Image: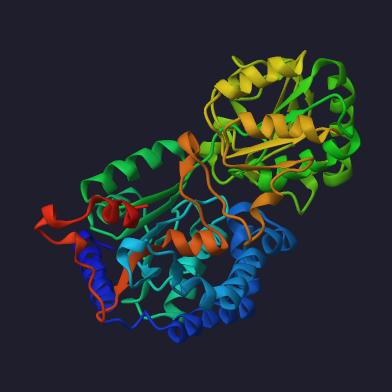
Amino acid sequence: MTESEIKELVAKQRDYFCSGKTLPLKFRKIQLKKLYSWIKENQEEIHSALKTDLGKSGFEAFMCETGLVLSEISYMLKKLKKFASCHRVKTPLAQFHSKSYKKPSPKGTVLIMSPWNYPFMLSIEPLVDCLAAGNTAIVKPSAYSPATGEVVEKLISECFPPEYVSTVKGGRAENTSLLKEKFDHIFFTGSQAVGKEVMKAAGENLTPVTLELGGKSPCLVLKDANLSLAARRIVFGKFLNCGQTCVTPDFIYCQEEIKAALLEKIKEEIIRQFGKEPLNNPDYGKIINQKHFIRLLGLIDRENIFTGGRAKEETLQIEPTVLDNQDFDSPAMKEEIFGPILPVLTFKEEEDALKKLIKLPHPLAFYIFTGKRNKAEKFLSRVGFGGGCINDTVIHIATSEMGFGGFGESGMGAYHGKEGFLTFSHLKSIVDKKTWIDLPMRYQPYKKLNGKIVRFFLK
């Protein structure tokens, strides 16, 4: 799509929003139901596209993509009336007699820029929240996942008119053209580097942004943890989607005395979950493209591979790989890995770990495995991160009851459920002042007012 075509599309969407057609709750619910029905009826096509782009099995595609979107739609349909209702608040006595309330209103025309690692879910789930809030939207899928991008375009074109919801496919040129336009909100999921560019472009138009980024999410394992269960849940979270997950455990940080036992249990779990030959497992996915495949191979410290390390270039696959004897200066610790490589670092005392984690850039997620609730609370309270789990990994994102997002280096803003509705809404503060009485104290001349009366009403 050319720059002029994008400009025209944004203008049409703005006109459609200004017409007021997206405001009624009945209209919004109809659109969400269309979306739900299309996804249900076309799950096989969606899953096939995800298999093409990322090698995802049908079960993983449902568990991590279509199933989550369907759940979000169901939640929004159930809660929409409540979320969209005005919320009454107290009124100061000085404003007697008035009614004060907060009124959720849609922001307008929204740009949703999605990544390639969960290309369906991270395109459509924010769209669900956006439409529930009453906006129009342009969705920009990643060029790195073209098969899923085609399905997203087909879904949107068959469910909605382009002046309401539309798709813009393409690469850097299309991204640049879109970011030149004036939107009422930009929702971006992706890398920190691109997130900075999005925020810079949004600043030219003072456009509010939601940035869902990433970072090196730590997985802390204390000596009192259930190591067998920790290994099972770490292996699940780390190698889901071949490690190409923004909230995957990026590295293990464990106490020295349990490292050997934990490594053995992780090795056992990799075999249990993926088999002795993961590269021959039809349910084991692949790296998104050659560029990232080569980048990941460069992060593997060949001299310190505990298990894994083999790769198959023709299928862009890398075995679940665990690296021993790593430290914060190791190659795999210099950047977000975003692949099936798991460095293991150690510490002696809990206070040493706490001091180190506090100083790291804020990650999107933090995981702690311990048998002591007070220890978990100590780390959760003092370490900065977006969200996380105690004695599990990644599952905190799979609910509409809690917002999902980062802060600092891992992003800003949140979505899912009510948080998502509020992200795409503006809360207008309204005072409804009655006309049958008008207290005189705010009007001049002030010298006639009794100071005690003024102080009473200002309490």
Any part of residue 96 in sight: yes
Percent x, y of residue 220: 73, 29
Percent x, y of residue 42: 61, 77
Percent x, y of residue 123: 49, 61
In the picture, residue 19 is in which quadrant?
Answer: bottom left
In the picture, residue 234 is in which quadrant?
Answer: top right
- Residue nearer the viewer, 209 or 161: 209
- Residue nearer the viewer, 121 or 376: 376
Q: Is residue 101 above or below residue 411?
A: below
In this image, 94 relative to 29: left or right? left
Identify which residue is drawn at 44% across, 73% down: 86
Q: Is residue 446 above or below residue 134?
A: above
In this image, 130 relative to 216: left or right? left
View extreme (left): residue:
445
Identify which residue is drawn at 71% across, 61% down: 63
Q: How many marks?
A: 0
- Residue nearer the viewer, 109 or 273: 109
Identify which residue is drawn at 69% across, 30% down: 379
Any part of residue 147 in sight: no
Q: Is residue 415 above or below residue 408?
A: below
In the picture, residue 369 is in which quadrant?
Answer: top right
In this image, 177 relative to 373: left or right? left
Percent x, y of residue 431: 32, 69
